[in-house]
Image (spheres, rainbow, N blue to C red):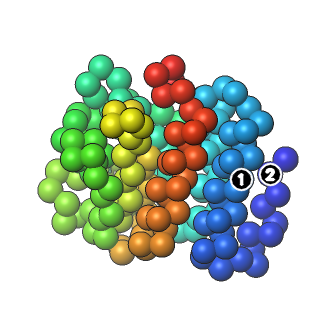
Amino acid sequence: MFKLDPIKKMNEEERLKYMNMLLKSQLSSEKDDIANLSNASAIIMACVERLNWAGFYILRDGELVLGPFQGLPACNRIGIGKGVCGTAVKTKEIQLVPDVHQFPGHIACDEASNSELVIPIIKEDRVYGVLDLDSPEKGRFTELEKEYFIKFVNILNEYIDWNNV
Ligand code: SME
């Protein structure tokens, strides 16, 4: 059972640390990758405020395909170089977008989204997909969150067998 009560009293950094601790605890107690990615997206939604979508797109046969997530139903497939997620894959760079309406080619899956943080999932120089976070608030994502989500993806890389997801 996840203990979420302590979060209420925590500041931003304590919550992010707690999120990564919960992730590690989930991944070290379960081997199934789909169960782990599903709970990973639920852990984000439980620990980080003011998000409307959090989840994964997995790279399959040259395009991104929707994976486990929390939020409204979303686009099933995104081409490499398309939207914020496809750009993160093409450039292999984190995309911290304060206003998605200013991002050329942004794909509006949920019209409530106004800002976005996308972390490419890269292991041994190969891209396996992205972690995508959306917020209804413009300028929502901070550099501190970016750092903790890089750690989040590093923890995933320790445990998830991306070739079999
Ligand atoms: N906005 C994303 C598409 C995915 S949804 O936000 C869940 C993009 O432009 O890549």
Q: Which mark is residue 22?
A: 1
Residue 30 is left or right of residue 84, and the answer is right
Q: Residues within 10 Å of mark 2 (few under 14, many from 20)?
A: few
Amino acid type, callout 1: Leu
Residue 63 is left or right of residue 145, and the answer is left
Q: Is residue 133 visible?
A: yes
Q: Mark 1 falls on what kind of element?
A: helix
Q: Residue at x 28, y 42 (%)?
A: 89
Q: Which mark is residue 154?
A: none
Q: Residue at x 52, y 63 (%)?
A: 148
110, above or below 16, in the image: above
What residue is disc 2 on?
A: 2
Residue 130 is left or right of residue 81, and the answer is right
Q: Residue at x 30, y 64 (%)?
A: 97
Callout 1 touching callout 2 (CB < 8 Å): yes
Q: Is residue 107 visible?
A: no
Residue 115 is left or right of residue 82, and the answer is right
